[in-house]
């Protein structure tokens, strides 16, 4: 078992719960809880490039917008269906999070994101993630055009 697993497993369970609460009910967007999941600065990579951002005012505005987009395309739930954790050192871990996204009409898309976390004061924070081409997957499954 990973040294960090007792912290990271409940971290992603809470992350998914916040996401699903917000998908089910727009008024339940936990902006502060979501912000608390990320480091002060973070980067994301996918086949379209690498982007970075500060966990500040603009990120705060983007959280409800991103969730509104997922609701608009018919996302019902996003559940963690598997989690593989690799300790990198005493303060960092790599987490392969296996998700299952469910959509109106019964379509499902499995996907895996890789998250790199820093653990300070027993609190994991995402500072980087690697994702597949989400838009292509949505097109391939007929969710978006």
Image (cartoon, rainbow, N blue to C red):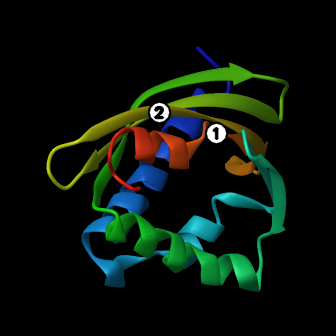
Q: Residue furthest top?
A: 1
**Residue 131 in the figure: left or right of residue 90:** left
Which quadrant of the figure has residue 99?
top left
Give the CA separation, mark 1 to mark 2.
9 Å
Return the residue at label 1: 131
Of labels 1 and 2, earlier in sequence is 2
Q: In the rendered image of this protein, does residue 103 appear above or below residue 80?
A: below
Image location of residue 47, percent across then percent down: 72, 39
Image location of residue 135, percent across then percent down: 53, 49
CB atoms of marks 1 and 2 within 8 Å: yes
Q: Is label 1 in a helix, a strand or a loop?
A: loop
Question: Which quarter of the image is occupied by the C terminus?
Answer: bottom left
Q: Is label 2 in a helix, a strand or a loop?
A: strand
| Labelled disc at residue 32 | none
Question: Which quarter of the image is occupied by the N terminus?
Answer: top right
**Residue 49 in the figure: left or right of residue 114:** right
Q: Residue furthest front?
A: 145
Q: Residue at x 74, y 22 (%)?
A: 87
**Residue 62 in the figure: left or right of residue 93:** left
Label 2 Cα crowd, 10 Å radius (few <14 / some 14-19 / many 20+): some
Q: Residue at x 63, y 30 (%)?
A: 95
**Residue 71 in the figure: left or right of residue 137:** left
| Labelled disc at residue 111 | 2
Q: Residue at x 74, y 41 (%)?
A: 117
Image location of residue 96, percent across then percent down: 59, 28
Instruction: Judge by depth and name the residue closer to the eye, 114 or 143.
Output: 143
Instruction: Judge by depth and name the residue closer to the eye, 49 or 35.
Output: 49
Q: Count up the numbered dots.
A: 2
Q: In the rendered image of this protein, does residue 101 appear above or below residue 60?
A: above
Label 1 Cα crowd, 10 Å radius (few <14 / some 14-19 / many 20+): some
Q: Residue at x 48, y 54 (%)?
A: 15
């Amino acid at each position: 078992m990973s040294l960090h697993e007792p912290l990271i497993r409940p971290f992603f369970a809470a992350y998914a719960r916040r996401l699903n609460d917000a998908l089910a009910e727009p008024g339940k967007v936990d902006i502060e809880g979501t912000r608390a999941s990320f480091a002060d600065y973070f980067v994301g990579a996918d086949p379209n490039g690498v982007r970075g951002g500060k966990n500040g005012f603009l990120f705060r505005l983007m959280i409800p917008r991103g969730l509104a987009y997922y609701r608009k395309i018919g996302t019902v739930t996003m559940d963690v269906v598997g989690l593989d954790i690799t300790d990198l050192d005493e303060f960092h871990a790599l987490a392969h999070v296996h998700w299952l996204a469910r959509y109106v009409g019964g379509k499902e898309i499995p996907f895996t994101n890789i998250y790199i976390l820093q653990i300070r004061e027993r609190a994991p924070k995402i500072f980087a993630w690697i994702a597949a081409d989400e838009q292509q997957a949505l097109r391939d499954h007929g969710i978006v055009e």
